């Protein structure tokens, strides 16, 4: 039996719900140059001061500060946040992807004042952008007596895993086994999917080894190399917190390692489920004059760091193809050093 008035009423409700305007987003201020940044709460689009951002991260045991390597605005934000987080909690350590585990003694010597910065950069194999990107953080830690963790696996180990596969880790000499995590979790899941989607679309990661291969063996070895980095950084963080109960760790890494609370971040959580993890994730906005947060990026971090896009690496497809070919030739020429 039909009830026209009820049908009309229900249809009216449907129209009100189905045709409702999308939620209004706060208009974000412009990013005028490459040194500018905005710290934003992705749930509300509220722009936070550095102090407000630190307050939003107050309960975190581990704070991941993701970065677009070499981006000036990103690095300025990292320094400001690290200072604010330390002011909030004096028992804070700095952890860095940018120093490798085997040079921890060199880094400790520098922090103790036993060697100078030139020796740190040489023997510690500091990145070439150390003076402008990481010196301020290390100097702040040194001045305040804070621990600095050389968290990353040595590049030579990562390269060998990328060339030979994860079984290479079984062959590392006993005296060097502490250089990296020896157990890799390579299971299928969101992080592996992300990596394959990225690497599979980049010829620089290797060609398929057969027509029937869903994912090339080269890409899977590259993923093992990536996970070697993640597992080692996560293990470094967990070991430090376990040895120093109650201490907060602020960790810097390339944003892919912690985006969406995956990669290194999820491995810290697996190692210590009791820890509260926070992620500050950078996003290069499409239009610096009218910054917007893409809806598919809102879950990438506890807070989002909006920055200007960097200059395009290549002006044409031909230029990019030539660079990728050169990169592939270089990778094939580099043998496992161990």
Image: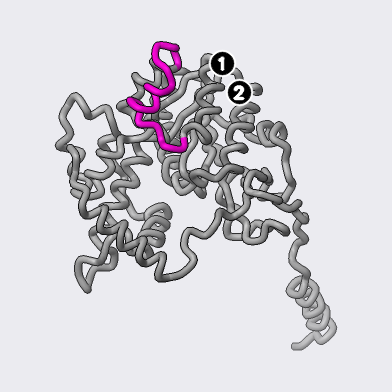
Task: Name the N-terminal-most of marks 2 and 1.
Answer: 2
Residue wearing tag 2: 86
Q: Residue furthest right?
A: 5
| The one of 98 and 181 positioned closer to us in this rendering | 98
Residue at position x 53%, y 21% in the image: 141
Residue at position x 63%, y 32% in the image: 80
Q: Within the image, what quadrant is residue 297 found in?
A: bottom right
Query: Does the stretch in magenta take in 7?
Result: no
Badge 1 density bin: few <14, some 14–19, many ≥20, Cα 10 Å: few
| The one of 206 and 124 positioned closer to us in this rendering | 124
Question: Which residue range is magenta in the image?
Answer: 111-129
Quick one: quadrant of the C terminus?
top left
Q: Which mark is residue 22?
A: none
- The residue mark sitting in front, 2 or 1, is 1
Q: How is the image coloured?
A: one colour
Q: Within the image, what quadrant is residue 267 found in?
A: top left
Residue at position x 26%, y 53% in the image: 331
Question: Residue 224 in the image: x percent, y percent?
Answer: 29, 48
Residue wearing tag 1: 144
Q: Within the image, what quadrant is residue 232 found in?
A: top left
Q: Secondary structure at mark 1?
A: loop
């Amino acid at each position: 039996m039909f009830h026209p008035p009820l049908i009309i009423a229900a249809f009216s409700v449907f129209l009100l719900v189905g045709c409702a305007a999308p939620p209004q987003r706060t208009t974000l201020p412009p990013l005028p140059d490459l040194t500018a940044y905005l710290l934003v709460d992705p749930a509300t689009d509220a722009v936070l001061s550095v102090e407000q951002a630190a307050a939003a991260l107050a309960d975190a045991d581990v704070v991941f500060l993701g970065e677009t390597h070499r981006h000036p605005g990103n690095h300025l934000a990292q320094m400001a946040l690290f200072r604010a987080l330390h002011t909030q909690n004096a028992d804070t350590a700095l952890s860095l992807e940018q120093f490798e585990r085997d040079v921890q003694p060199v880094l400790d010597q520098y922090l103790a004042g036993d060697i100078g910065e030139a020796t740190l950069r040489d023997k510690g194999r500091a990145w070439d952008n150390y003076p402008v990107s990481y010196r301020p953080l290390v100097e702040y830690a040194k001045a305040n007596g804070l621990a600095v963790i050389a968290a990353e696996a040595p590049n030579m180990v990562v390269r060998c895993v990328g060339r030979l596969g994860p079984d290479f880790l079984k062959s590392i000499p006993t005296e060097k086994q502490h250089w990296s995590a020896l157990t890799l979790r390579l299971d299928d899941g969101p992080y592996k999917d992300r990596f394959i989607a990225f690497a599979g679309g980049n010829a620089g990661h290797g060609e398929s080894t057969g027509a029937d291969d869903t994912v090339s063996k080269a890409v899977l070895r590259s993923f093992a190399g990536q996970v070697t980095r993640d597992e080692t950084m996560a293990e470094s963080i967990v070991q430090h917190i376990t040895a120093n109960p109650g201490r907060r760790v602020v960790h810097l890494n390339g944003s892919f390692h912690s985006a969406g609370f995956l990669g290194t971040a999820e491995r810290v959580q697996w190692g210590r489920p009791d820890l509260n993890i926070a992620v500050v994730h950078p996003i290069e906005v499409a239009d610096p004059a009218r910054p917007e947060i893409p809806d598919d990026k809102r879950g990438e971090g506890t807070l989002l760091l909006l920055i200007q896009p960097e200059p395009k690496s290549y002006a044409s497809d031909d230029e990019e193809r030539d660079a990728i070919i050169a990169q592939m030739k270089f990778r094939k020429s580099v043998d496992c050093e161990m």
